[in-house]
Amino acid sequence: ANREQLPEFDGRGVLADGHRVPLLANVGSGTDAQAAAKAGAEGVGLLRTEFCFLGREKEPTHEEQVAAYGAVFEAFAQKKVVVRTLDAGADKPLPFLTDSTEPNPALGVRGYRTDTTSPGVLARQLTAISEAAANHQAEVWTMAPMISTPAEAQDFAALVRTANLATAGVMIEVPSAALMAERILERCDFVSIGTNDLTQYTMAADRQLGSLAELNDPWQPAVLHMIAATSAGAQGAGAKPVGVCGEAAADPALAVVLVGLGVNTLSMNKRALSPVAAVLRTVDLATAQKLAQLALRAASAEEARSLVRAQLPELD
Ligand code: PEP
Ligand code: MG
């Protein structure tokens, strides 16, 4: 088989019983977005805006930002596009926002926290997102990375509204945010779980260290409990939307578990759309929920993974 060829995906994530799970794409540019649209993504679940400006010494201009975001919105007319505001710091340094001398960058001033050390950059970014959204027909949702408290979610949502953007949410990447999801969702419209960081912070294991890969595994039952807590909080706050946009969503067996834990949408690399859709089509919601309970009760990542995979014989 030609490895460059994308597997086919018909553009509708759905379980065997008809329960809809929209499958969205993670993108970092307009070119990426076009390729994701071509692969059948139902929208964008994560636009990593910092990828548009990596290596920049200076804050991108208003015009540069409007053009970069507009290129993504153009590829997804009438579809949902979740824009994440700049996630600078730790594994994604941006010289104009991050202090390279911090002793512990993963626990430092990164993501939304840079709004306190570099005030104005976030508000200007939101203005550019708003202008780009007004130029195109996409349904734009805006979210902040690295949120730790309900107060941060409230402050971010206020900034989003000031910029005349309709829908404000936050990423759940920190255990404190997962545990406080209900209070957070009383203050904003949706959450998206970033399992890459949520795993790193739950397990206290640097996501960039290969030697810690066993700990840094989203199948770790502790991580699944964080996701379950997030869903429970979302239910408590009036069944507000919960997405997953970390790498976990691209693992077909884990995608089933995420749906069983109450996740509403999954966002992934475009190459994962077809394999994830294929497995979702083989299970109904009750089965996904049963598999999620099995995984939550496991004592290890390995046990969770093998218990679930044994019940999904269509996986190779
Ligand atoms: C995540 O942390 O899971 C996430 C989607 O964000 P990033 O990988 O860009 O930190
Ligand atoms: Mg992250």
Image (cartoon, rainbow, N blue to C red):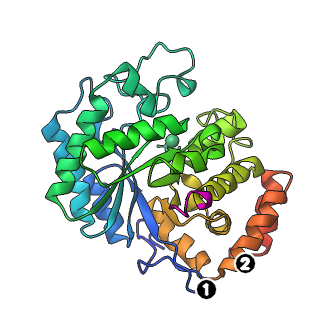
Name the residue located 71 percent from the left edge and 38 percent from the top edge.
203
Relative to 58, does residue 232 appear above or below in the rendering? below
- Which quadrant is home to the C terminus? bottom right
Residue 94, percent across and down?
36, 27
Q: Amino acid at mark 2?
A: Thr
Binning the other alpha carbons within 10 Å of mark 1 as few (below 14), some (14 to 19) or many (20 upward) gives: some
User: Furthest residue to the bottom?
Assistant: 17
Please give left or right for residue 170 compared with residue 69 in the image: right
In which quarter of the view is residue 103 placed? Answer: top right
Name the residue located 52 percent from the left edge and 78 percent from the top edge.
20
Give the residue number, with chain letter if any, for mark 2: 287
Name the residue located 31 percent from the left edge and 22 percent from the top edge.
96
Report the Cα–Cα distance between label 2 and label 1.
Answer: 10 Å
Whether 238 is among the magenta residues is: yes
Residue 274, percent across and down?
50, 73
Binning the other alpha carbons within 10 Å of mark 2 as few (below 14), some (14 to 19) or many (20 upward) gives: some
Callout 2–callout 1 Cβ contact below 8 Å: no
Q: Which residues are magenta?
A: 235-240
Q: Nearer the viewer, residue 294 or 302?
A: 294
Q: Magenta region's main secondary structure?
A: loop
Q: Amino acid at mark 1?
A: Ala
Query: Residue 271 bears which disc, if any?
Result: none
The secondary element bearing badge 2 is classed as helix
